[in-house]
Image: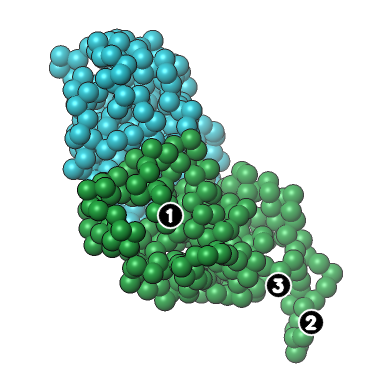
Chain colours: A green, B cyan
Amino acid sequence: MAKGILDNNENYQPGLSIDCVIFGFHDNQLKVLLIKAPYEDKWSLPGGFVPIDQDIDTAAVTVLNLRTGMEGIFLRQFATFGRVKRNDNHFEKAVLAHFNILEEDGKWFTQRFVTIGYYALVDFLKAIPHKENSTEIIEWIDHKEVPDLILDHKEILDKALNTLRIELNLMPIGYNLLPEKFTIPELQKLYETILDRKLDRRNFLRKITNIGILTKLDEKKSNVAHKAPNLYTFDKDKYEEVLKNGLNQGW
Amino acid sequence: MAKGILDNNENYQPGLSIDCVIFGFHDNQLKVLLIKAPYEDKWSLPGGFVPIDQDIDTAAVTVLNLRTGMEGIFLRQFATFGRVKRNDNHFEKAVLAHFNILEEDGKWFTQRFVTIGYYALVDFLKAIPHKENSTEIIEWIDHKEVPDLILDHKEILDKALNTLRIELNLMPIGYNLLPEKFTIPELQKLYETILDRKLDRRNFLRKITNIGILTKLDEKKSNVAHKAPNLYTFDKDKYEEVLKNGLNQGW
């Protein structure tokens, strides 16, 4: 967080922030990007304020870039959090003290804040946070080993994960998260990791095939002792089409 | 809208509003609740500001009640709208002029506003707006005959309808919208009205039966010439259970 924002606030929408939940998948691991500021003993989601001249979707990109240096990540809005008690006196006082700002000068920062949540799912080996001259720690942390978070950030994270799981029923997933050529068991593992439960092999094969986004290659996975599984790739055009129109598994 | 809010603003969260999209269903008609203020030539969604001491979910209930007199309606947050250009000088000036407020005194009202959208689906014969001493017109209007709306309210309405359609894939619907005893064709009509497309009769029967929320009654619909269809009712316990856990038609 930059000191300027705390006392020079005309350039930001009052009482409104954005928090980003960036999920990272690779090799059957689901992680989440968290930040720890030197003046806090808890971790936080990468968040920040809304520039007065930016649409909120643009502001989300700005916020993520400012906090993590990351660019080109497609962020989706999922919910807005606005309990009165989500503000936390302890956290706010610690921030002001760290920047040597008197409480009376930091009223813009200590007012009630409502926050808009955005999330993304990326490959954590490809999406690498980079901050120069930052005293903050930025880390990919396993989603099952999330430490104590500030404010209501745990609630925001849980809601984002729940949204991601629901999205699995509405749109395809996997592009940019798996190698170009992959096996059905690898794709199934991606779903199982996000859903945190085992799926029936035949059922999964039937459903994923029915969507029509896979191209079966005339190749088998090597380095496998016996019964080498077939390799597949995404049919990019069909994938994009389903992404646009939804899975339509419904009525 | 009350004049007090426009110039006595300390009791409200700055730059944040709530807009409610209330869908009403009855007898195969889908309507939406719209308001027309005397000082505007366009209609609007029932909306308002966020009391500084209320959680946003509570504020949504307050806003709907203030604008329509309606109570006891379950509102679901669906998205937040924050394009910079969503504000509309014309609309704001008309409101200030109507209340005889100078532009310099109405700065709280003319600042940039981000709005949180909430929606509900009710029976429009049961949920009746009532406002005493109001100069506003409140009406249930067919969702296909929506007139010009202020600001980005058309976009908000479209997004709410899209969300409602997606929700059909995630949870059961119909309780409180159909008579206590209903036929499968009546239930199918509800889905078709919301989705705005015909559904295959057998497919629908199979899917709706599989969810396990229907109880087949030992009665047939009367007043039907021949082939009287069976009557059903919702199994309330199972309905609530599925509502809680989701349809799980997914993976």
Q: Residue furthest right?
A: A218
Q: Residue at x 46, y 68 (%)?
A: A135
N-terminal label among 3 and 1: 1
Residue at mark 1: chain: A
The CA span between labels 2 and 3 is: 11 Å
Give the distance between the C-alpha atoms of the residues marked 1 and 2, in whole angstroms.
51 Å
* Residue type indicated by callout 2: Ser
User: Does label 2 or label 3 sit earlier along the sequence?
Assistant: 3
Q: Which mark is residue A222?
A: 2
Q: Does any portion of residue B249 appear in the rendered image?
A: no
Quadrant for residue B240, please give it: bottom left
According to the image, label 3 marks what residue? Answer: A183
Q: Residue at x 27, y 32 (%)?
A: B49
- Tell me the residue that label 1 is attached to: A2
Q: Does B198 sit left or right of B32 as displayed?
A: right
Density class for disc 1 (Cα within 10 Å; few <14, some 14-19, many ≥20) is few
